[in-house]
Amino acid sequence: MTDPAVTDPLAGATVVGDTAVGDTVAGDTVAGDTAVGDTVAGDTVAGDTAVGDTVVGDTATRDAVVDDPTGPTIGVLALQGDVREHLAALTASGATAMTVRRPAELAAVDGLVLPGGESTTIDKLLRTFDLFEPLRERIAAGLPVYGSCAGMILLADRVLDGTRDQRTLGGIDMTVRRNAFGRQVDSFEGPLDAPDLAGGGAPLRAVFIRAPWVEDTGPGVRVLARTGGGSAGGGKIVAVRHGSLLATAFHPEIGGDTRVHRFFVAMVRENRDAARTHHPSS
Ligand code: GLN
């Protein structure tokens, strides 16, 4: 395929061409194809290993392997964005991970990740690849879906600062503001308190890249994290759960801390096991 929007992780976001800071950070960390990207990811992994992998991670993996040797099958929507990083994080979290580009692949998964990238591009590609309606239907039927950054936007019922023709899959009763943190702090990372997502462990290391924030949520939505501090971007909702849908404004797939993915894998496993209890023959 030659279409850069399809083949290049985050190509859309980079080409859209925000500031030098945004481009560099997005290119290096999210696309992660180059030596530079690997170095950045590697650095962060080193910093997080003791917390994420040793304390929380190992126990979760061990339990999962005993009960469920292959893990649930979780797809990563692979039309654009940081697909590879999510596949790796899901595999490290005990799932069987696969890319999803076709309706038949969507039909085969127990859960789905919508990666970061550019929500307007992914929205268009979903329709080009005949996935928009099938995915909406599966979401309505209770498919567990986790959206990070652009994926969060796609799961929002309402979007502010979207493009005029932008549509979302919807499912989470919330309003998100696109590119909300603004040009000055386009991309940043830092510790984020999210006890549920972090399994009660140390704060998550959260990477934000031209991220949205959540302006408001409906009654069924649980807020899982807010940014800290009293600055302009402080106290903003950046992680939510609504039934079987999970969304974060940040990118946990970067940096080797797999706790958010483990949380999602557990959601998918519960959902699948509940379905089997109700339909024992399937
Ligand atoms: N700003 C992008 C959008 O609107 C999201 C950026 C990201 O996913 N890192 O889709």
Image: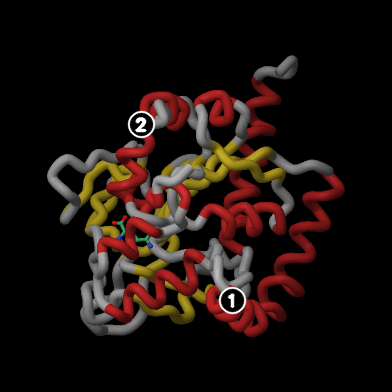
Q: Amino acid at mark 2?
A: Thr
Alpha carbon separation for disc pair 1 and 2: 32 Å
Is 78 positioned to the left or the right of 67 in the image? left
Seen in the picture, residue 46 relative to 181 is either above or below; the reply is below
Residue toward you, 278 or 40: 40
Indicate the quadrant where residue 272 lies. top right
Residue highlighted by disc 2: 128
Looking at the picture, does residue 223 appear above or below residue 112? below
**Beta carbon of the mark 1 residue lies under 8 A of ligand 1:** no
Q: Amino acid at mark 1?
A: Ala
Viewer-proximal residue among 235 and 253: 253
Give percent across and percent down for residue 135: 43, 30
Return the x and y of residue 174 as percentages of the image width and height.
28, 48
Q: Is 251 displayed left or right of 159 in the figure?
A: right
Residue 256: x, y in percent?
63, 70
Occupied quadrant, residue 273? top right
Q: Residue at x 40, y 26 (%)?
A: 130
Q: Residue at x 45, y 55 (%)?
A: 8
* Disc 1 target residue: 35
- Image quarter for ligand 1 equals bottom left
Within-10-Å neighbours for mark 1: few <14, some 14–19, many 20+: few
Q: Which mark, residue 1?
A: none
Q: Residues within 10 Å of mark 2 (few under 14, many from 20)?
A: few
Q: Quadrant of the C terminus?
A: top right
Query: Does residue 236 appear anywhere in the picture?
Result: yes
Mark 1 vs 2, N-terminal side: 1
Q: Residue 63, how many percent across, how many down?
A: 81, 53
